[in-house]
Amino acid sequence: MFKIILARLRQGHQTMKYPDGPPPKLPDRFRGRPMLNAGNCLTGCDACVRACPTGAIVVKDGRPSIDMGKCLFCGECAKVCPQQAVTFSAGYQLAAHQRQEMVVSDNQPARPNDIAMTRDIRKLFGRSLKLRQVSAGGCNACEADTNVLNTLAWDLGRFGIQFVASPRHADGLLITGPVTQNMHLALKKTYDAVPDPRIVIAVGACAISGGPYIDHEQVKNGADAVVPVDVYIPGCPPHPLTILDGLIRFLGCGAPVK
Amino acid sequence: MNNHSLAKLTNGRAVKLDAIPTLEFEGFKQAILDGTAAGQRVSAMFGDSTEQADITQLYVVMADDEQNRLCVGRTQIQGDKFSSLTPDCPQLHLFEREIAEQFGLKPIGHPWLKPVRYCHSKTNRDAWDRPANESILPAVGDFYQVEGDEVHEVAVGPVHAGIIEPGHFRFQCHGERVFHLEIALGFQHRGVEQAMIGEPTNRSIHYAETLAGDTTIAHTTGYCQAIEALAHCQKTARAQMLRGVALELERLANHVGDLGAISNDVGFLPTASYCGRIRGDFLNMTALLCGSRFGRGMIRPGGVGFDIDAHCAADLLCRLDKAEKDTANAVNLLWDTPSVMARLENTGILPQRVAVELGIVGPAARASGLVRDIRQDQPSGIFRFSHIPVSACDNGDAFGRAFVRWLEIQRSIKFIREQFAAIPAGSPLVEVGPLAPDSFTVTLNEGWRGEVCHTAITNKQGSFARYKIVDPSFHNWPALAYALRGQEISDFPLCNKSFNLSYCGHDL
């Protein structure tokens, strides 16, 4: 007992101040929101398009755009670009309501998307949001970094958000993975078991677009092929800070958009 | 009895495909049985189509840990069946089920022939004679059942109560006691092995990185070593060292997380809370190296994607010191608390004999007293020069599996410190040429769950004709089922966490 108390004193209070204080420091090599400077692009150059593993980059009329919903944030495009037209910033606020809001072109959108939920939904869930997590394929990295939010450093419970053990107890789903054929039915049944009104949050490139498995016959290319999605949180996997930011700004209690 | 008929290979070296002997089926079978009788393990057994539709090749990769060698052979199966080896060699049971599912070959005499991933075969045959146009539903089919008074069945999954990957578990219970647990997986099947076929594309490395997201470094190292072996590429000592450090950081993060999760499942919250956070500290050290907490982008064919400078190394060492102290403080509470020890000891016992028979790998095998560790037995890269002592204990219970992790945590930290004391010079990344045609290579690495085995075969054009991945979980899921026999069903979470196996690594 004595040792347990001593350990408690030693380990101290570790819950971060964010969102009231500054966010935890991200590593220098962190690859967040991609930035495009189309003015730098060379005519006819498609090095970034060829380097992209998932077809996230498209050049149209000489202007490139990156779909963060497909992006694996591997940084290959930035590496091959002869003009430094593509860079990955430290921007971690990546969540979006709509699929097309995740398309970055020529430094647009310059600010993170507004993802706050509508007023009547906020009235219902703003102070208590119970989520059921469905892992529908994928590699378990998104799941792991979602789980991290339950550790005491992040303490998701302080925002009234909790992962529950039954869809009947849930206000919505948090989906990871590209939705494999083998998880299609289970996901649908889980969604149907959540009482209305319900929300769906898709976390990670897989759940948004299929990620690295895009267009495999074994997958459905993301959650919105099966259920309507309210919030998308891009990344492969998204940093826990990106996921937390998405959740709490959706609830309307997040850090101000910078 | 030295597998005279099989080719002898070294981990991470390529040979011409001709060098792999094609045996008659009886000789193939005998070679495997002799090998396992002499203490070898089956690292992989898999099928490969040939130009003739009715002939399938079977390959076997045996690990001879004592001789630090791999023994590889193949045989040809004509028609749609072969005689099952499982009754004589239980560790083949899942490999044979996989061959049956992928190639429509029936292993005659297999005691429990069920699908593995619930998908259609690559050929026009089907081992269960299901019509080709019928969809296959996951986990639908026969389950082992116990009948009798007060016997009941508990079914769990695929969607679980926490943030867990999907899988289906059936318990045959008598009151609280579990007679039998059967596990049906395949929900995460996303067709990675199939997608690896052909020339390596810019997506291939991402398949390797996401085979099992928490084992990114070990799997990507295995994939890159296969490419490098086939392209005869020499990496620098610096790259090998950084790969080793990344691999041990991955082990540290996961082991610390597991100890926290084990502690949570016995209801001891102090260690659960501390370890959950400290795991993040280790993940952030990996992010310091490459920007990603899971090591995405770190391992690349020809070396590593990110170099390290003195400032970064110093920062990492400083964080390592702090995390080491925090971990010791949190973890030692477990061994000092009688109520924790009472829950861990004698729970979920996997006897050594069973571990040998089932071909168990990694910390689960070492906790049952088996001294097997790829870093020692089949070392590659930095582990050929810098040795980490194998951590083992004889208990075979949840305590053993927890304690082995604690020993490994301490040794991995020591290893990283040693490596950073003398960082070799050199380029982090070298150019990789084209792959040699008609060649064969096997790479083994000790991931944090155990042996990660990648086998690559190239065709005439020098692109992948077959790429086989065996995640340690593929070997170890049956161990969890076995360990639960005779346990209380309420001990399942604890037993499960003490193995902490991968669903996606199994389902591919």
Image (cartoon, rainbow, N blue to C red):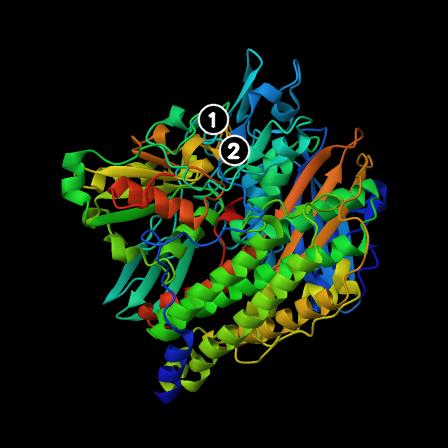
Residue A144 on image: x %, y %: 44, 53
Q: Is residue A14 above or below residue B11?
A: below
Amino acid type, callout 2: Pro
Q: Do the residues under discs 1 and 2 have CB atoms within 8 angstroms?
A: yes
**B290 relative position to B139: left or right:** right
- The Cα atoms of the two marked residues, 1 and 2, are separated by 7 Å
Query: Which is nearer the eye, A130 or B83?
Result: A130
Q: Nearer the viewer, residue B435 or B73?
A: B435
- Residue A23 x %, y %: 41, 52
SS state under label 1? strand
Q: Chain of mark 2?
A: A
How many marks the image carries: the answer is 2
Q: Would you call the spot at circle 2 few (<14 residues within 10 Å), some (14-19), or many (20 or more)? A: many
Instruction: Reply above or below: A152 against B224.
Output: below
Q: Does B277 sit left or right of A49 as displayed? A: left
x, y (%) of residue B301? Answer: 72, 43
Dot placed on the residue nearer the N-terminal end, 1 or 2: 2
Tell me where residue B241 appears, x and y as whole percent. Answer: 74, 59
Residue position for label 2? A34
Nearer to the camera, B386 or A250: A250
Q: In the structure shown, which secondary structural element does the residue marked by tag 2 occupy?
A: strand
According to the picture, the residue beneath numbered tag 1 turns out to be A104
| Up/down of B162 relative to A34, above or below | below
